Amino acid sequence: MGVWYDPSIMADEKHRPRLLIVGASGFVGSRLALAARERFDVVCTGRRPPGEAGWVEIDITDAASVERAFEQARPRYVALLAAMSNIDRCEVERELAERVNVEGAVNVARACSRHGARLLFTSTDAVFDGTAGIYHEDDPPCPANFYGETKARAERAVADVLPSAVIVRLSLVLGTSAASGGNSYLEKVAGNLKAGNPIISPTYEVRNPIDVGTLCTLLTELLLEEGAAGIFHIGASDKISRYELARAIALRLGGDPALIVPQTEPVAGRAPRGRDDFLATTRLSQVCRTRVPTCQEVIERAVAMV
């Protein structure tokens, strides 16, 4: 059946609540799986589990597969991180993006509702078009690309199915994956710097990134704060352009900042991106104990992982 979950782990539920991480083989998911073990009995899922204890097979586009995973893991908490997040691919493969990002999210939310599990669902700053310069949780979505459209629809659908769900919007996550073959933004930049390859970086795309370590701490706090519900923005307290970010990473890693090449206009043929997607984090600060870091602190913490 493709199940590698060890039923003997069930005994640990007396001491730590069960957390099912949907998308544990990805960058953020792999890090959350490690960080959350201090507070949770963690069960990981993936479409192709690695064949070891503590994993359950799941295909979120298949409601029956989702139900089997929930029956096997019996979670009290669920973190839904799995998504089709390649913006350009979503623009082309729209039917698949809709199945994964919208229908998949609904399948997991419905399973949480049936099993009485608390859900945290990760969304994106791409639900906004980047023209306002700052966005709060109650600002209406206005996506610039199809990826953002699917995530905006998923947010509404998840909230309709499960009003108690926590929906987290992220801009850019920095760090390294705990899984092999990591392909995060930081890992790409570090690899190109080491190889001496130029790194073309937009000067006009502005974000407030978060390092994956701080992110995992905040996700854990939001999961355990039973009164928290609805949308939360997670990111740095200030913002930085992708060009400035890449230069800062290069300097921190001892690479050649001349390899960071400014890109001043969008590339033809790519899906549109928001220019200034700064996510205000006031609501997050009112609920979580962990202080929202500055961009400088985010960069320092992320680069320390390389």
Image: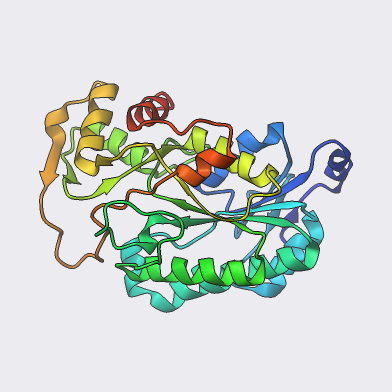
Q: Report x, y in % for residue 74.
A: 80, 56
Up the image or down, 101 lies above or below 274; here it is below
Q: Is residue 63 left or right of residue 124?
A: right
**What residue is at 66 percent from the left and 46 percent from the top?**
223
Query: What colour scheme has been applied to the protein in the rendered image?
Result: rainbow
**What residue is at 71 percent from the left and 73 percent from the top?**
64
Q: Report x, y in % for residue 38.
A: 70, 31
Residue furthest top in the image: 254
Q: Nearer the viewer, residue 273 or 284?
A: 284
Q: Nearer the viewer, residue 298 or 89?
A: 298
- Numbered label tally: 0
**What residue is at 33 percent from the left and 71 percent from the top?**
91
Up the image or down, 197 lies above or below 300; here it is below
Quarter of the picture containing the C terminus is top left
Q: Is residue 296 left or right of residue 120?
A: left
- Res 276 visible: yes
**What residue is at 18 percent from the left and 68 percent from the top?**
269
Q: Report x, y in % for residue 301.
A: 42, 26
- Res 31 visible: no
Up the image or down, 273 lies above or below 174; here it is below
Q: Nearer the viewer, residue 51 or 125?
A: 125
Residue furthest bottom in the image: 95
